[in-house]
Image: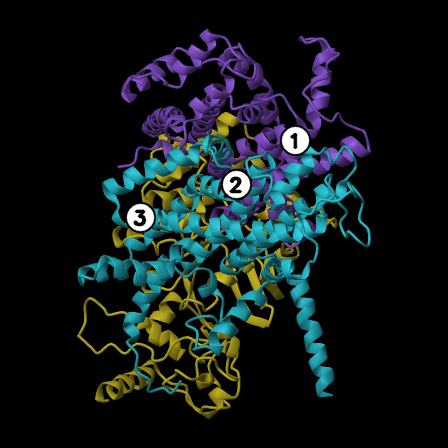
Chain colours: A yellow, B cyan, C purple
Amino acid sequence: MATNGTYEHDLLLDVRNVSVDYLASNGAVHAVDNVSFTLKRGEIMGLAGESGCGKSTLAYAVARLLRPPAMTTNGEVLYYPRSQDLVRHRKRHEKEQPAGSPVAPIDVLELTSSELRAFRWDELSVVFQSAMNALNPVMKIGVQIMDTLRVHRPEMKAAERKKRAIELLERVGIAGDRINSYPHELSGGMRQRAVIAIALALNPALIIMDEPTTALDVVVQREILELISGLCRDMGMSLIFITHDLSLLLELVDKIAIMYAGKLIETASRDDMYTHPRHPYSYGLLNSFPTIQGPRRKMSGIPGSPPDLRVLPAGCPFSMRCPMAFSECSTVRPSLQPSTKESPEQLVSCHLYNSSFKDEPPTTKDIAAKYEALSERSVAR
Amino acid sequence: MPENQKQPEAVRIADTVATDMGTQIDSPLNTGVVGAAAIPGVGTPSPVGGRLRDFWRIVTVNRKVTIGFFIIVFFVLVSIFGPLLVHQDPNALSNETLMPPSAQHWLGTTQTGQDVFAQLVYGTQSSIFWGFLTGVAVTIISLVIGLAAGYFGGVVDDIISLFTNIFILIPGLPLALVLAAFFPFKGLITVSLVIIITGWPWNARVIRAQTLSMRNRDFVESARANGENIWRILFSEILPNEISIIMAGLIGAVISAIVTSVGLQFIGLGKATDVTWGTMLYLAQNGDALFLGAWWWIIPPGLCVAFVAAALSLINYGVDEVANPKLRSEPQPKKVKAKLAAKAEKNEKAVA
Amino acid sequence: MRYLLRRIGFYLIALWASVTLNFLIPRLAPGNPAEILIARFQGRIQPQALQALELQFGITNQPLWQQYLTYLNNTLHGNLGLSITYFPSPVTTMLAQELPWTLGLTFISLLISFILGTFLGALIAWRRGTFLDSLLPPVFSFISAIPQFFLALVLLYVLGFMMGLFPLHGGYDNFVTIGLNPDFIGNVLYHSILPAVTIVVVSLSGWMLGMRNAMVTTLSEDYVLMAQAKGLPESQVMLRYAARNALLPNITGFALSLGFVVSGQLLIEIVFSYPGIGFALLQAVQNSDYALMQGIFLCITIVMLIANFLVDLIYVVLDPRVRQTRS
């Protein structure tokens, strides 16, 4: 998490109460419901959850890349630009800031289209899930890097742009002469690297990666992950890494956020999440993967399937599948709160940690026991 | 869901990965669920009343389809019942030549005193009937050829494809002209035959492509592995999945047949004594109807052709839109939001 | 490269097939058209011409394959026989006279309607859900369903006859001296406006709708989203990312529709009495001028092949994926 240079503020991104709806003619589906989180400079955050939980939607909302019928209905995405970029991006904030004062953030959701265009890729870039689909099939990949340079760095000359493109490709492990290749001439792994190279073109402060390794085989997956973590270390970038594969995150990230049915149900540092996941769902996710070492044990998994977002129950959305649910769970909706006195930075959205409902929060062993009991019962039938 | 519902959850993560990898949205051509089957609510129809209701739903689901459908119904009704209701003989000559529309002759008369309106009605019967017949014939031929090429593959496919591509390359109307010129008999049958000879390649190509992709599907492979009879495979496995493509092709073929036959007749390849829209245009053109200002003679038949062709096209486009939702004109999110807000308000008022 | 070679091979086969077709049709038609023709002209043309006709139609006693070879030989040497309508001009002379008119009209109209239609289609697909998007497609669907020649008739009547704005027939006025002088050229252009407008209006809708549909599919692709995410200006995204890719299926469609273009062109020439090969074909049919008919048919086929080949070339340039040899 190295940071180069001094920054006015350690915070990079402050997402507050963002909600996204999908508008259909017969009603709105709440794909993302009142989600808030923060991200520091140089921090790597993992965003995990099942398919359809809203993680990609949330990320796209932050980047303002949602397409109709999706609409951001609420919230702010406060972004703290690097101080030296103040002049370039914040033309409309005319009042002079005295030197040394904290940098005022901009709300990404409120940017005008020209401000947004300047903001995009320069501050925040995106790596899409399927590299083959994300690359323009009729354009050379060198050109796809250079056109961002052309638009955002008009002072660069053609030769400089070319040099930078080659430099970027080599940084991600592709031979420089490939700038004249078309996407279909590259292998799957190379395409993913190319997309990462494009994302790095303007040295952004934040990159959002949407399941960048899902479509790749395990060996290539490993290489890409190592590449990503190396780049973050060297360049001090922040990263939001979206995946459904929790085990990937545990190696890569500094902090993890877990979503379920459009809501953020737990955020924790990597170590906290690994040693004591608070939310029963997080526990279930973590322990769905068999370990290579350790004793053989029965796989528990999480019973049931994700809910239909159109007909969410009152109360906690996970209550119907939760092995530890009690009466209030299905009537009162929980909110993201510090979990225990010992680990107040680990936030969880669960009534088990609400002192007005339960005197003692459960330990990890308690959760484990409940899941074991569940699997025992299912075997017994 | 009750918490003791058992499901193989550990495996589900693997399933999720598979779903994520298969995010490509297949075009309707590739999914095999096309056209009517893609309309929500229309699956396997329940007996009798169910089928009628499904049919009605297909017709009303899309505005384009509805408009097109009713126009066609109108013309078909005219072609069936028209001649019975019209008392004038379309071929009867009279002394009232080139008269504009009047109470006696609703659409005026021709150069030889014939009643234009009567001709139009009789012509409807002729043009629509022959157009439909020709279209069906073209579709059947292209179906057979397309199925053969797509199913058998290999050398058979190569030969058929070569043949098809050559015919597509050679422009239809000139070939039709040349053929019709050499046939000694002019008339409806010749025109139809000529259209059939020149019109089959288009749909054959489409059906071939679809059959090829069907053939590699698992359900066909398993049918073959089971030793099912070729005919059974073709007719009960492959064909039902291509119904909507075939229907779209049929509609296209009918449009083409009607328009082309009118075109051929217009340039004189039909029999002048037949009463069809095309021959009306031919006689009108030769009688210099335009330059004599006799718009009532030359405009109505052309308009009829235009309406029929437009109606059939509308049906095709409409069904296309239903099958491929991306093509529909979507209301903007603001409008949808406004609509929802209005609905919510209405509900509130209703409750209060 | 291999792709192009395969296409050339196909075109050569197609050429051979249509030449053979040309040969076979008059000989296979029921009733012997040649004999009918000759009977018709008996006593009205000189013996040499009659003999020439007989030879041309194989009213010789040579076996079929020999006639075929003679025919092929003749064709390759450009000997397409004599035209009856314009007797004694050889068919090739007539073709040389009429072809430029058709090519000129078609080429320009096609270019205009393709470019305009494609651009319009891209534009309205880019602005989904707007007024243009709900107005233009249905209007143009209706227009494209109207038979071309009928539209030609209507335009001729309204703009030519009623309003007297445009000439009613012909490619040029008779009183103008033919040649590359501005008077003539201006006159020619004036006469070609109505036919060109008809062609453009009818084919425009086809391209527009095709491009719109292709764009709609392309716009939902990830690479367009990524282009927007890169902060590129809208025009660049629409043109270089979306339209450029949506163009490809349209170009294929363009090649396939060339046949229809020619057919439509034929009818329009007939309506406007435009001195192109379409009009000449009709006259040939009416006069049973078989030599000219066959010559025109051959000519049309060759033009089609060349046009298709040109489109193939363009496609190879536009789509880099085709250049890679398939394993």
* Residue in the foreground of this view, choosing between B180 and B74: B180
Disc 1 residue type (three-letter)? Val
Label 3 sits on residue? B150
Figure check: A80 above or below A180: below
Label 1 sits on residue? C271
Residue C139's spot in the image, x, y percent?
67, 48
Figure check: B217 above or below C52: below
Rendered residue at 44%/47% (across/down): A134
Label 2 sits on residue? B187
The residue positioned farthest toward the front in the image shown: C43
Query: Subunit of mark 1?
Result: C
The Cα atoms of the two marked residues, 3 and 1, are separated by 41 Å
Residue C245's spot in the image, x, y percent?
49, 40
Query: Subunit of mark 2?
Result: B
Q: Give the structural element (helix, strand or loop) at label 3.
A: helix
Nearer-N-terminus badge (3/2): 3
Residue B163 left/right relative to C240: left
Disc 3 residue type (three-letter)? Gly
For residue B44, which quarter of the picture? Answer: bottom left
Figure check: B6 above or below A176: below
Residue A254's spot in the image, x, y percent?
40, 61
